[in-house]
Amino acid sequence: MKHLLIALALALPGMAMAAGGGGTAYKFDPDLGNEPSLQRGAAAFMNYCSGCHSMGLLRYNRLAADLGIPEDLLQENLMFTSDKVGAQINSAMIPASAKWFGKQPPDLTLTARARGDDWVYSFLKTFYVEEGRPNGVNNLTLPGASMPHVLGGLQGWQKLKPAEEGEEHAEAGGHGASHAPEFEVLEEGVLSAKEYDGLVADITNFMVYAAEPVKIKRKEIGTLVILYLMLFTFVAYLLKREFWKDVH
Ligand code: HEC
């Protein structure tokens, strides 16, 4: 119960922010029908994020079944924190080492729903170098975030451009500004800007899936129901014609 209350308390400001809308730097359109993107997102999550973050409400075998990943590939390539396919996706981090960050890395199963997909996408794109910060970076979407920029080598390193006369930066949760923030590249990353956007899109897509795994199925069922209704309407129409044909 206590955990539930804490989780609620943590999630509420995020929901308010997501509901408020317009506060994030970038927009993101999830595509749960894109299985390769979800698979790449899962792989990236396991490689770059599961060292610190868990997805405690999702099990490996559920993920494999939903995303069309054969179990042997799953075990070889995606399972770093457990060897049981029925296990939840826990983080590799022991709680004590979380103290380095001043903050326990939160479980990310529901984050895409609590914060919103735009928020997650923007968060991963808006780390910038700032001197004096414990990790050397700050984040425009979550100011003062204690997460290091773990994808910095891939994205490269950027800093905020000083605001121009009369113009304010798009701050998270701020003034509904959804124009892209101005960054200045300090050091190129291994990926091009476009490739990095693709990686972040895959990770966000995967997190959207994880926050509501039934969504994929629901869409499939929805399509079947509509098809069935169309077919049924046609049959009913034929039947009606048959019944009434001698009346007139
Ligand atoms: C070195 C440990 C570490 C790694 C690796 C890491 N994170 Fe984090 N992350 C953190 C910490 C610590 C926080 C808490 C930040 C805060 O609230 O100040 C955090 C916060 C977040 C949040 C914000 C959650 C919220 O609702 O406030 C998101 C989203 C996130 N991480 C995503 C990711 C993704 C995606 C990856 C992989 C690409 C990743 N993290 C890798 C440590 C890490």
Image: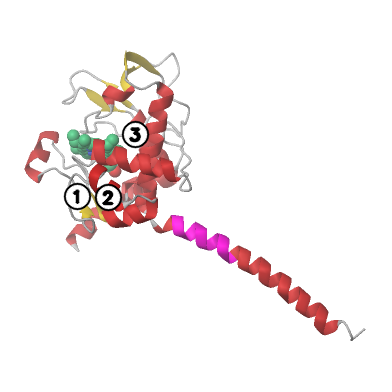
- Residue 194 lies in the magenta stretch: no
Q: Residues within 10 Å of mark 1 (few under 14, many from 20)?
A: many
* Residue at which label 1 appears: 90
Between 233 and 82, the residue placed more toward the observer is 82
The kind of residue on which mark 3 rests is Phe
Q: Residue at x 21, y 57 (%)?
A: 87
Q: At which x and y percent is residue 62? A: 32, 57
Residue 44 is tagged as none
Total numbered circles: 3
Determine whether 24 is above or below 109 in the image.
above
In which image quadrant can residue 203 be found? top left
Residue 123: mark in rendering: 3
Residue at (39% x, 44% y) in the render: 38
**Magenta-tinted stretch:** 216-225
Q: Considering only order in the chain, which callout, 3 or 2, is on the residue closer to the N terminus?
A: 2
Question: Which quadrant of the rendered structure holds the C terminus?
Answer: bottom right
Q: Is 219 covered by the magenta stretch?
A: yes
Identified at 26% across, 26% down, the residue is: 138
- Residue 100 appears at what percent x and percent y? 10, 34
Residue type, mark 2 in image: Asp
